[in-house]
């Protein structure tokens, strides 16, 4: 009796001490932990310049955290990270030099572009404008499908992937807002990127496991091994691909002029998807399956990066008024998922930093796109794609 009371007191005390040892804010904790591990700083593990979308994603989160807290640590870190991949004369280097030389036309590196645009706004230094122009030149020449969708990469002939919308179009929209705000052709093109992805990847009500959400991608020429013979889409809904797309919607809705027709189109897509996302959450945990088309199937699991992206998108969409949430059920779903995340996927390391679990390493349509493929990819501890998404979700959650 005495012993168990003592133990109870001790564990309370431990809880108290560990709660004190780390920042109160999960957003601050996630950011400080990424910084302590030198994640997302523009360098790869061999200290070579790396133009990486996940660094771009973290920098987006650090920027929002800087704006929310006024703490310059976050700004300085993202600036140093961008300086690691852009020379003083504005040349983007490292792996991008390779990519552009071989005209790989990958949308992935373009996700670092919003950082350059932000730094140009902040500093006025032309190097950031030059670096952003490099990506715009790439987009201007980017290969497209017959309908006008950017190919995900030159090697993925005629393929649109949800991921590519986040990688290319958040930058494209911010660039047009900053330098060509009345270019209606450009706004129509950006809107079209979202809309083609939506129309070509939306599950039909006759599809098995219909969730009303979006398949990972489609092949306009219907020749990929995974392409459905009727519409060309891939066979499964992969949570992180949809997560990228949802984040792109709320981030671009913030920059597209509300008077532009594209605003209503994007908002309409978001309004359609948000309640379906709420309904696709697992009823008991509140989070989402890795392969959303196959809930509960053996091998499937609750994956953390997609969930964090969904929470960020839903909470931001509601806060900014892009999503109408009449009875509060969408907000409640996002909050429930967030609580699961902090309880199950956040771990405290002995050095006081935060660890982040259960993020799947990759999901690509370079293979066969089957359920077996997606569930066979390992999860990675502290994967930046997931940790950065958790930072974004936390910034939003802490604004509630
Ligand atoms: C800013 O953040 C860093 C990292 O969390 C922290 O060490 C520092 O005390 C903060 N500065 C201020 C002024 O709050
Ligand atoms: C930009 O600077 C880098 C590094 O100093 C240099 O290698 C490169 O030739 C320069 N590019 C141009 C176009 O001047
Ligand atoms: C307007 O946008 C289109 C599509 O991005 C581009 O090709 C064109 O050069 C832009 N026009 C101007 C005047 O900037
Ligand atoms: C909120 O409305 C949706 C329909 O839009 C319904 O499915 C859901 O059950 C409602 N939730 C609550 C808590 O009333
Ligand atoms: C698809 O690829 C996975 C490995 O990524 C493999 O395990 C599976 O057997 C393949 N399925 C088919 C139908 O080829």
Image: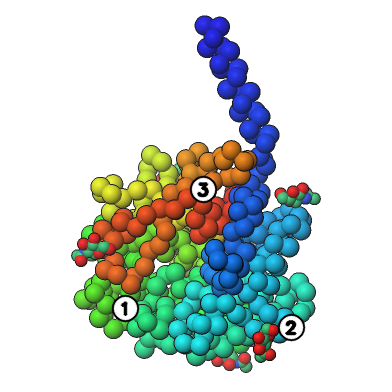
Of residues 163 and 189, the one drawn nearer to the viewer in this rendering: 163
Residue drawn at (74%, 74%), measured in percent from left and top?
Answer: 121
Give the Cα separation between the discs numbered 1 and 3. 34 Å
x and y percent of residue 180 in the render? 65, 86
The quarter of the picture where residue 210 lies is bottom left
Residue drawn at (65%, 77%), measured in percent from left and top?
Answer: 86
x and y percent of residue 234 in the render? 29, 69
Give the Cα separation between the discs numbered 3 and 2. 37 Å
Q: Which residue is mark 1?
A: 219
Name the element at disc 2.
helix
x and y percent of residue 335 in the render? 52, 45
Q: Which mark is residue 126?
A: 2
Give the Cα separation between the discs numbered 2 and 1. 39 Å
Q: Which residue is mark 3?
A: 356
**Of marks 1 and 3, the one in the foreground:** 3
Any atom of ligand 2 within 8 Å of the CB at mark 2?
no
**Residue 336 visible in the displayed image:** no
Name the element at disc 3.
strand
Of pointers 1 and 3, the one earlier in the residue sequence: 1
x and y percent of residue 319 in the render? 60, 55
**Label 1–label 3 contact, CB within 8 A:** no
Of residues 326 and 397, the one drawn nearer to the viewer in this rendering: 397
209 sits to left or right of 334 = left
């Amino acid at each position: 009796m005495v012993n168990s009371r003592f133990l109870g007191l001790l564990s309370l005390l431990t809880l108290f001490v560990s709660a004190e040892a780390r920042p109160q804010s999960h957003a601050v904790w996630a950011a400080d932990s990424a910084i302590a591990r030198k994640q997302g700083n523009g360098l790869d593990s061999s200290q070579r310049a790396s133009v990486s979308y996940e660094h771009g994603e973290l920098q987006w989160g650090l920027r929002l955290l800087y704006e929310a807290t006024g703490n310059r640590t976050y700004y300085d870190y993202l600036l140093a990270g961008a300086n690691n991949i852009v020379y003083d004369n504005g040349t983007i280097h490292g792996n991008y030099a390779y990519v552009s030389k071989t005209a790989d036309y990958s949308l992935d590196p373009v996700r670092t572009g919003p950082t350059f645009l932000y730094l140009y706004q902040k500093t006025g230094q032309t190097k950031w404008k030059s670096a952003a122009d490099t990506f715009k030149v790439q987009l201007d020449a980017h290969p497209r499908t017959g309908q006008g969708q950017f190919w995900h990469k030159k090697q993925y002939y005629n393929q649109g992937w949800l991921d590519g919308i986040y990688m290319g179009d958040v930058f494209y929209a911010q660039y047009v807002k900053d330098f060509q705000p009345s270019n209606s052709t450009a706004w129509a093109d950006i809107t079209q990127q979202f809309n083609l992805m939506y129309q070509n990847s939306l599950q039909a009500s006759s599809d098995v496991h219909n969730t009303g959400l979006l398949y990972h991608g489609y092949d306009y020429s219907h020749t990929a091994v995974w392409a459905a013979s009727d519409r060309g889409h891939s066979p499964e809904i992969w949570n992180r691909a949809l997560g990228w797309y949802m984040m792109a919607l709320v981030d671009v809705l913030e920059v597209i002029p509300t008077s532009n027709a594209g605003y209503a189109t994007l908002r309409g897509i978001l309004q359609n998807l948000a309640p379906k996302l709420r309904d696709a959450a697992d009823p008991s945990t509140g989070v989402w399956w890795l392969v959303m088309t196959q809930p509960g199937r053996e091998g499937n699991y609750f994956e953390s990066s997609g969930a964090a992206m969904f929470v960020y998108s839903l909470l931001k969409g509601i806060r900014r008024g892009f999503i109408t949430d009449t009875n509060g059920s969408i907000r409640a779903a996002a909050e429930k998922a967030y609580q699961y995340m902090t309880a199950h996927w956040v771990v405290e390391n002995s050095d006081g930093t935060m660890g982040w679990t259960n993020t799947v390493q990759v999901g690509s349509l370079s293979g066969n796109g089957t359920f077996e493929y997606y569930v066979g990819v390992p999860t990675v501890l502290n994967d930046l794609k997931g940790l950065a998404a958790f930072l974004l979700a936390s910034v939003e959650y802490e604004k509630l």
